[in-house]
Amino acid sequence: MRSNVFLREYKTGKGETRFTLIVREYGRKDRSIGLGPVSKRVAQDRRLQVLQELRLGLFKTEPTVHLYVSELVEKYFTDFANGSRSPKTVKTYHEVLKPFLARFRGFRLNQVRRHDVEKYLSEYNVANRTKNLALSTLRLVFQKAVEWGYLSASPAQGIKRLPESSQGSRALSPNELSALWDGLSVWQRSVLRVMVNSGMRPGELSNLKFKDIDWEGDRLGIVTDKTRKTKNRKTRFIPLNQDLREELLFLKENLPVNGGNGRVKVKPREPHQREHVFCHADGGRVASFRSAIRGALKKHGIIGVSPHGLRKTFCSQLARSKVHPKIAQQLMGHSDINLTMRVYTEIDDDQLREAVNALPTMSEMQRSKFQLIVGQK
């Protein structure tokens, strides 16, 4: 046999078991591949993988520097992300990579293979949308490792995205929307009322400032500038309807604050609280509205609606009011009209009931027939 791979077991100074692969090819010096803190079964799998690669001519010499996965992510990749991505994106990277690092802590880059990544994703107990976000992040991490010369090939390359539900969060029905306001705290009511009547994304709501509101022009701007970015990087304007204007005027002079024990008090705004529409007592902007929205929906037994569902409710209301899709697209800030049309073409139970109720009754048809006969000449 011109090539073979041998598995060798040894003990570290602390008495821990480790494994090394010895790669032997005809006419070449033996090469060793340390496998780190893996089980004997995993080590045996690695041996078979490398042996198969050798026989198929796919085995590649590994880079001489073997970084740990955690070292690459926590040092090199974090520095790259901080210098080229927004703080929000960096935070997302951190959250997505945290369980991956926990799973592969102690592994070197050259010890992670494609089937390891696929197995990790299959066992990751989250929705496919979150798995695909993790996959996209891992692709970027390993691709940067290849570009920087720490890895010969990305183990995430060629892994296909998982199917996702295109529906996502649903919109509130008219009945749910009309009943939603009962029993809410002042804080919950303000958040929901502004979102439902503006179609803003939660991040856009967090960045909304009073200077963005044109009281005379009766509109607000969802702004892209040096410190704030909308999803499509374009500023758009939302006219103020009566509910939205009333709520913003209330918030201009009043600040709902947590009074302890789950109670929310309303206090007059102080000078340092007049920059952001939704802010804490210290004037800093509110970064998340998830708990307030979830609490309000849970209180009314509404399921299947996320914070994004309130934005969808705004679009759904436009569709029910026969607003042209192109106008809705501009109000929503969608870059693609197909995104708007997905909401416009959704059908809920209330619409089905309205359609059936619109059918003429038997008495109406008989009355129409009688009138036709009587009116004949």
Image (cartoon, grey):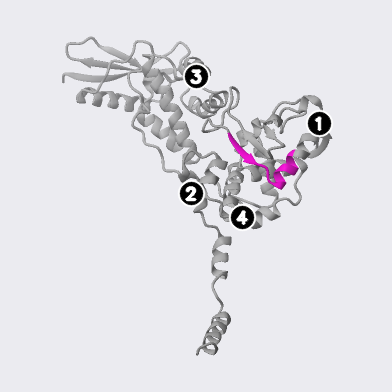
- Give the crowd class for mark 4: few <14, some 14-19, many >=20 residues within 10 Å: some
Most foreground residue, 164 or 156:
164
Residue 216 as seen in the image, left or right of residue 158: right
Question: Which residue is at the front of the view, 83 or 229?
Answer: 229
Verify CB contact (< 8 Å) between mark 2 and mark 1.
no
Mark 1: secondary structure:
loop
- On residue 84, the disc is 3
Query: Would you call the spot at circle 1 few (<14 residues within 10 Å), some (14-19), or many (20 or more)?
Result: some
Q: Quadrant of residue 44?
A: top left
In 3D space, how far apart are the residues under numbered discs 2 and 1 (Cα atoms)? 40 Å
Q: Amino acid at mark 2?
A: Met
Q: Which residues are magenta?
A: 236-248
The local crowd at label 3, few if under 14, some if 14 to 19, many if 20 or more residues have their Cα within 10 Å, is few
- Looking at the image, is mark 4 or mark 1 earlier in the sequence? 4
Marks 1,3: beta carbons within 8 A:
no
Above or below, 374 relative to 201: below
Element type at marker 3? helix
Gap between marks 4 and 2, in whole Å? Answer: 18 Å
